[in-house]
Amino acid sequence: MTLSTANAAWQKHRNKITTNRGGWRIGEAIYNCGYSMMDDLVGKKSFFQTLILNVTRRLPSVKLADWFEASFICLSWPDSRIWCNQNGALIGSTRGSPVAGIAAGILSADSRMYGPGSITGGAEFIVRALNWQKEGLSPLEIIEKELASKHTKPGNKPVIVGYSRPIATGDERVEAMEKVTASLDFEEGEHLKLAFKIHTTLAEHYQENMNYVGYVTAFLIDQGFSPKEIYRIYSTWVHSGVHACFAEANDKGAGEFLPLACNDIEYVGAAPRIVPKR
Amino acid sequence: MSNRKIKIESRNDQFTSIIKSEITLEIPADENDFLVKEMHTHGYNVLDLMDSCDYIDVFFLLYNGDLPTVEQKLLLSKLSIFLINLGPRHTSARAAANAGIGRTDVNHIVPIAVMGMSGEYNGSKEVEQSMRYLTKHFTQSAEQAINDCLANEQEQSAQVEAERIIAPGFGTDHGGQSPLLNEVKNKLLTISPEQGYLQWANNFVNAMPQNTKCGWRLAGLVAPIFLDLNFEPRMGAGLFQMLSCPGAFAHGIQFSNKPLTDMPFLKDEDYDIINS
């Protein structure tokens, strides 16, 4: 029996790793994307510079890494009512490991409603929107075209990712990051300028505002990051708040965080019935 | 910046004050609200379910609200047996094995295995996407659907990866077709509903031009069976994860008491750093 061409194509990857990211050469050095970690990075570059280097293979400037660090602070705060934080707290309360609690919180925020899970939608929208603007569409026409392309459940308000927010309208983090952007002397690029025009138009016509994901993605697309890179960098975006909620619940008595009595669940299903003979 | 000042206002959403469940009724013990004296799943007392049903019955009941028919039970049972062990080469088993050999807390092996099977290539995301594809195109003729796929593929043109996936769950599997998967499909076809999703998927695969070398992928077999069992697409990923998890855990836990050297660690000459 002869092996197929496809088989040969897969064979070449067996028992072999080729990497452009780096690795450990025992007794020689640890490499990160061409840099020696101990000689070039530790004590010389920040954690965020190194993180972004590992994701993108590009070492960012100090000021861009500082911008990222500020943006990480903004997304996560210690309110255990927030869904990802609450999962950290629940696992803390049941004496789970901190790694499990934080990992569960991070995974919870891979959501199309909030957190890093909404990044791709927000980033791809502003890229699409700028192309439409260059084709001559006004901000209002861009909004209408985007909303018309979306499938929304009847009765639900149509939403553009990056331009709406659960619980509240408006987003204080946008203003905070504008200050950071200005203090670090970043210029507003074409995506961010358009994002603000969409924000103003949306507020006027739909009573919605740009949210934090809308701001961050527009800024970073202008800085040359792809949607995929932004999603990867921010994958652990919420961990700080989850840490806080885990720690507090873990320090309290086991099971004390939001215990539920039987009657805290309202049963709305089938009435009690007899199991049929099987 | 001042003209961009944003007013933050609560939406004043009306959140429910109590969690509702369509699945479980727990009747509290007489003297402690947190203890249960009687529990019902979709109306059935758990003690009666223990006497009269098996695991597959209650698994189906949980997600469908009713006990399965004889035909549904047979189909789910056979699919479950196939999925219970995807083998040591599946990413889920490999992730679990890395955790086992790496002395990860054994408490974490199952969640790691589940994350290892969550991808859109050979994982639960592909199952979900395949279910969504099938529900969207089920009313089309299989021939029309395949023509649309091929036309769409031409539009996207750049097929740079080794695998050719023409619709979620359908395409090549390591560049070819799995003989085992084909045999499993034949077995399941004989007990699947006439005019059902698996039958449609079979017509869809049969309509693929032979020169494409495309056909069944694992997700393309699992997805139509889930739909034939009345499971919704949004459930597909989780159901696949649960049914496939036992094997992945088995492959992981077997390494948890083995020496670190029982798993390969590539030599430097096989680990090529191209820009060190």
Image (cartoon, rainbow, N blue to C red):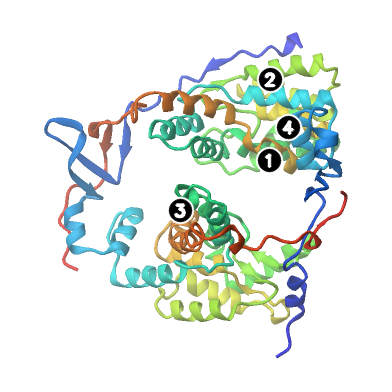
Distance from Cα at disc 4 to Cα at disc 1: 9 Å
- Tell me, yes or no, whether dots 4 and 1 are on the same chain: yes
Quarter of the picture containing the N terminus of chain B is top right
Q: Earlier in the sequence, mark 1 or mark 2?
A: 1
Q: Is residue A83 above or below residue B192?
A: above
Residue at mark 4: A217
Q: Amino acid at mark 2?
A: Val
Tell me if mark 3 has few (under 14), some (14-19) or many (20+) residues whose alpha carbon lies within 10 angstroms of its own: some
Tell me if label 4 and label 1 are in contact, CB under 8 Å: no
Distance from Cα at disc 4 to Cα at disc 3: 30 Å
Residue A197 visible at all: no
Left-right relation of A64 to B261: right
Residue B33, x across and y down, in percent: 19, 31
Q: Which mark is residue B129?
A: none
Distance from Cα at disc 2 to Cα at disc 4: 12 Å
Q: Amino acid at mark 3?
A: Met
Q: Amino acid at mark 4?
A: Thr
Residue in view at x 49 percent, y 78 percent: B184
Residue at mark 2: A174
Q: Amino acid at mark 1?
A: Thr
Distance from Cα at disc 1 to Cα at disc 2: 18 Å
Q: Which mark is residue B235?
A: 3
Residue in view at x 68 percent, y 60 percent: B265
Residue at mark 1: A120
Residue A66, x across and y down, in percent: 77, 23
Question: Chain for mark 2?
Answer: A
Q: Secondary structure at mark 2?
A: helix
